[in-house]
Amino acid sequence: MSGKIVNNVFRASGVIAATPGGLDWSTAVVTGSTLTATAGKGYFINTTSNACTVTLPSSAEIGDQIVFADYARTWSTNNVIIDSNGLNFQGDPDTYTVDYSTAGQSLNIVYSDATKGWLPVSDDAVAFDHGDPPTQKGIFAYGTTGSYVSISNLVSSSGVVASDVTGVGTARYSPGAAGYGGDKAIFAYGYTGSNVSMSNLVNNSGVVAADVSGVGTARRESAAATYGGDKAIFGYGYTSSAVAMTNLVNSSGVIASDVSGVGTGRSGLSAASYGTDKAIFAYGAEANGGDDVSLSNLVNNLGVVAADVTGVGTARGGSAGVGYGEDKAIIRGGAVAGYSPLSISNLVSNSGVVASDTTGVGTVRAWTAGTSYGGDKAVFAYGNSGSRTSISNLVSSSGVVATDTTGVGTVRDRIGGAGFSYAA
């Protein structure tokens, strides 16, 4: 055959793409944690020691083809993660997480067009899966300096706390805060001189909206966490006594009416998400200034709160919780009776099991708050160590708390913190 091949179903450039058997297979088995793939090649990927993130080409033509194979049948232990590098993958943009996790799997992908992008034409278990990307930024807001304040501080995707932003909404302390909708956040309830039932939504750019008249019982010192991937739950708190009620928040940020609580009523507790779609409430005090407790309540992916679990670790109030490592949580700080602040922490596994105390790093304090950042890390900031402070402590993706970072913004305590934004 001679002459120029015009645009065709195989490749827009006119060069017919190779079949899998005719690909240029890399002679070196890939064992590293990253791989930059090239069209027209095949790769054996060995994830025995670690997961491997594969970055696809940043530009592609119709018919471009790449094949990956599980060299050691270990993809179910350490996944292969696809970074589509600005192009779509099965119609989803590259902000989504795409991973392959079946032992012995092979994956043959072909580029289609700008709409659908890369398409698997074969994967031996049809194991394509994706989830929302993790949140990248955080926000701390409200609190007290001795006077109630309505200021906020954004946290970058690298864990840097920004200077004060003049707040929107009613100044108050002890609100709960959590992420919702995947990339937004909500602050709700608190104390203005009396308990209130109001909320403020935070959009995916970190802008705090005006007050929304609350639903549910006015209270302070409740805790909140994300569950189900895109919803939130506020639980417990103090009215004229410690209560065990909860309020669910849907993926649009709408708070539902009270649900009669399960477990011991308490205030000044902490909450965090774990296991990618569940949550935990832990610690607290059975009354305002009353007996501290060491117990927890798990929340399933439908927002149902389970009965008390006898706690592990020091009973305390005024602690803070946050997720880290994408599926685990950490609870840090607090104070024991007589207001003796702590710097201990307790890790929570991806099945909701609370570990024993870990000796803390950094300044002891209570009434701090935490937020996730950078997809798999966390930061605790502000609080009271005997006096109010604005210091922060970063938490690594493996749950290790770092030393103090000099604080930015107004010193205060009894604040709220939550993650937001898919974009770094």
Image: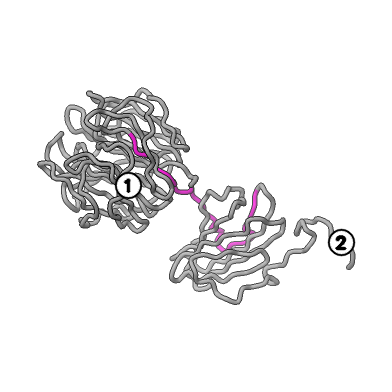
Dot 2: what SS?
Answer: loop
Does the magenta-highlighted stretch encompass residue 123? yes
Q: Which residue is depicted at the point 26% across and 49% down?
A: 331
Q: Which mark is residue 135?
A: none
Q: Amino acid at mark 2?
A: Lys
The residue that label 1 is drawn on is: 322
Mark closer to the chain start, 1 or 2: 2
Looking at the image, which residue sits at the far left?
Answer: 338
Q: Kindly indicate whether the residue at mark 2 contacts the one at mark 1 (C-beta within 8 angstroms).
A: no
Q: Residues within 10 Å of mark 1 (few under 14, many from 20)?
A: many
Q: Which residue is depicted at the point 60% across and 59% down?
A: 56
Q: Amino acid at mark 1?
A: Val
Q: Which mark is residue 4?
A: 2
Residue 360 is at least partly visible in this image: yes
Residue 306 is at least partly visible in this image: no
Q: Which residues are magenta?
A: 116-141
Looking at the image, which residue sits at the far right?
Answer: 2
Camera-nearest residue between 107 and 137: 137
Which quarter of the picture shows residue 164?
A: top left
Q: Position of residue 101 (x, y in %)?
A: 49, 62
In what quadrant of the picture does the N terminus appear? bottom right
Residue 29 in the figure: left or right of residue 223:
right
Q: Is residue 109 above or below residue 218?
A: below
Give the color scheme: rainbow, by chain, secondary structure or one colour. Answer: one colour
State the separation of the CA atoms marked 1 and 2: 61 Å
Q: Is residue 100 above or below residue 26?
A: above
Does the magenta-highlighted stretch encompass residue 419? no
Q: Position of residue 68 (x, y in %)?
A: 58, 66
Residue 57 in the figure: left or right of residue 276:
right
Q: Position of residue 346 (x, y in %)?
A: 24, 53
